[in-house]
């Protein structure tokens, strides 16, 4: 990674401006063309120096203040149905299947967000109704800790 690549990452690590052409604005600040910035980002991704470039929404600032990690005890067949249905819900940001340890019987996890707890409960009920999987625990967030990202 050369000095320009480091400058690009430093310029982008705190986020892009919310404008029609955010990469063009960043490129201009760096004194390079948009094409060069994008080519260099793509090369860093190809080399594995950067894993991904993605958006991160401050959901609490956006009014999404009810957050629940819902966990189900699900059979293999139910996991497939839960995953399919959960991925179809806008309120679900991620879900996954994990082998349960002996002291915890739940194996399917889904992170659900809403403006109110009732919104999350409605999604949970919808997933239960559509899959027949009703053995779950809803683990609501009670406080959010500071999030930090990798810095260079």
Image (cartoon, rainbow, N blue to C red):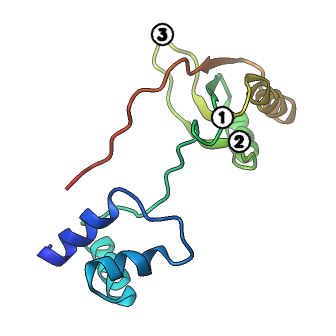
**For marks 2 and 1 on the same chain, the one whose residue lies earlier in the sequence:** 2
Task: From the viewer's perspective, tell me whether residue 33 is left or right of residue 80.
Answer: left
Q: Are marks 2 and 1 in contact (CB under 8 Å)?
A: yes
Task: From the viewer's perspective, tell me whether residue 110 is left or right of residue 55.
Answer: right
Report crowding for label 1: few under 14, some 14 to 19, many 20 or more residues within 10 A (C-alpha): many
> How far is the residue under mark 2 from the one under mark 3?
29 Å
Task: From the viewer's perspective, tell me whether residue 145 is left or right of residue 107.
Answer: left
Badge number at residue 96:
none
Per the image, the residue denoted by label 1 is 112
User: In this view of the protein, which residue sits in the foreground, 131 or 15?
Assistant: 15
> How far is the residue under mark 2 from the one under mark 1?
5 Å
User: In this view of the protein, which residue sits in the foreground, 36 or 25?
Assistant: 25
Report crowding for label 2: few under 14, some 14 to 19, many 20 or more residues within 10 A (C-alpha): some
Per the image, the residue denoted by label 2 is 91
Residue 143, image x and y in percent?
50, 20
Mark 3, secondary structure of its residue: loop
Foreground label between 2 and 3? 2
Residue 94, image x and y in percent?
58, 43
Looking at the image, can residue 44 be seen?
A: yes
Residue at image x 35%, y 56%? 14
């Amino acid at each position: 990674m050369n000095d320009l690549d480091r400058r690009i990452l430093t310029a982008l690590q705190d986020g892009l401006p919310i404008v029609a052409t955010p990469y063009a604005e960043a490129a201009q600040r760096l004194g390079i063309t948009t094409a060069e910035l994008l080519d260099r980002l793509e090369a860093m991704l190809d080399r594995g120096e950067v894993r991904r470039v993605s958006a991160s929404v401050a959901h609490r600032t956006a009014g999404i203040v009810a957050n629940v990690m819902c966990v189900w005890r699900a059979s293999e067949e139910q996991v497939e149905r839960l995953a399919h249905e959960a991925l179809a819900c806008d309120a679900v940001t991620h879900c996954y299947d994990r082998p349960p340890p002996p002291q915890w019987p739940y194996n399917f996890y889904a992170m659900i967000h809403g403006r109110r707890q009732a919104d999350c409960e409605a999604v949970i009920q919808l997933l239960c109704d559509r899959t027949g999987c009703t053995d779950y625990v809803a683990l609501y967030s009670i406080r959010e800790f500071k999030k930090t990202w990798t810095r260079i």
